[in-house]
Every structure is written in C-alpha cells, then in structure tokens.
Image: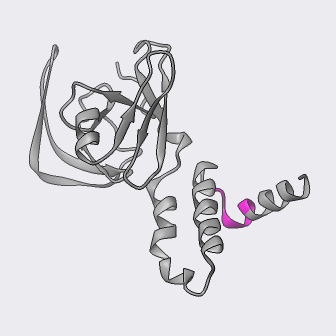
Amino acid sequence: LTLDPNYVYLDSMCSDHSAFTDEFLSDVRTSDRVLRTNTNAGSIESNKVGQWRGFEFHLNTGGIANLLSIPRLEEAGCTVDYSTDGEWTVKLPSGEVLVFKRDTGVCNRMPYIDVRELGTDEAVSCVQTVRKNFEGLTKRQVEGAILAGKLQASTGHLTDERFRQLSLEALRHE
C-alpha cells in the first residue's frame, strides 16, 4: 500500500526529504550518506538520492509517501506559512511560491502538492541556462521570457510551437 506517487506531503516530523518513487526526481544517484527510516513497520535504509526543485530527496522505494521536510525547508531558507482553515504555502529562496492543498483521503487534511501540476525542474531551469541569450534585451523583455518559461512549465511542457499557438489564440480573444 502506497499513497499517490504524484503527491508530495509536507511533514513537520521527518528529518529529510524522501520519496518512494523516482518518477519526479532528476539526477538520481548513489550517495555516500545512508538514510535510515524508522517506522512502526520497521527500519529501511537507502543510499539513493535525487533532486526535485533544488532539494535533495532520499529515494526510499520501501516507503509509502513522498515527504517534504519542513525543518529542512526552513534550513534551506524557505518560508513556510500555514493556516488551520486555509492553504499552506512554501516560498522558495528563488521567490517561487508552492501552494499546498489539503488531502481529503487517507491523510485527512495533511498538506500536499501534486507534482504533475508544477511541471519539471528542467523546463524552469532552461530559462536560466540561456541567460546569455538575454543580452541586448530590455528588462521587460527578460521578465516576459522568464514568465513565459514558467507558464509553459505549468502547462505540462507543451512544445514551443503549440505554446506559441495557444498564446496567440488567447491574445486574439482579449
């Protein structure tokens, strides 16, 4: 039994970020550091790690949930805001804000984020890797390009051509 592999839950009690699936992780590799997870069902050890949104996750294929550690987020300079009757948000050092929903299933009210709704790190970081292409552009043009990259990432990574078509259609309807 596992929880939805596309959900990452915020957890105030876990000491490290951990994932039971590598589907949303990039750069999965063997680490020198071993993470031992102790649960009611026993102990599990893992030395595999991967990246998601700049955070290192331990890959624990024997786990049941993907967990984002609030203490580790705070150590990384993130701001975690919550309300007992509203949304939980995590503001990353980059300024990006992740908005968490409340689970209505097995993990009643536990905050989670669906990684499918965010896109992948690669599309967002792509804008950063072409910084030299911004030379000669105005500040407004650069901001527009960065916003377009983030918007394209949030659409599930449409091809550049399809994204351009949809953008032009939207402008025609304004």
User: What's the residue at 46%, 63% (across, down)?
Assistant: 125
Camera-nearest residue between 88 and 23: 88
Q: Whole-percent x and y of residue 101?
A: 50, 26
Q: Whole-percent x and y of residue 15?
A: 18, 33
Q: Whole-percent x and y of residue 96?
A: 47, 50
- Classify residue 66 by image quadrant: top left
Question: Can you say whether 20 is above or below 56 in the image?
Answer: above
Question: Can you say whether 32 is above or below 149 in the image?
Answer: above
* Furthest residue toward bottom: 136
16 to the left or right of 24: left
Q: Quadrant of the N terminus?
A: top left
- In reply to whether residue 162 is colored magenta, the answer given is yes
- In reply to whether residue 30 is colored magenta, the answer given is no
User: What's the residue at 34%, 38% (across, down)?
Assistant: 21
Camera-nearest residue between 139 and 121: 139
Q: Whole-percent x and y of residue 26?
A: 36, 54
User: What's the residue at 20%, 47% (across, down)?
Assistant: 48
Q: Give the range drawn in magenta.
A: 158-163
User: What's the residue at 20%, 37% (across, down)?
Assistant: 16
36 to the left or right of 10: left
Camera-nearest residue between 144 and 41: 144
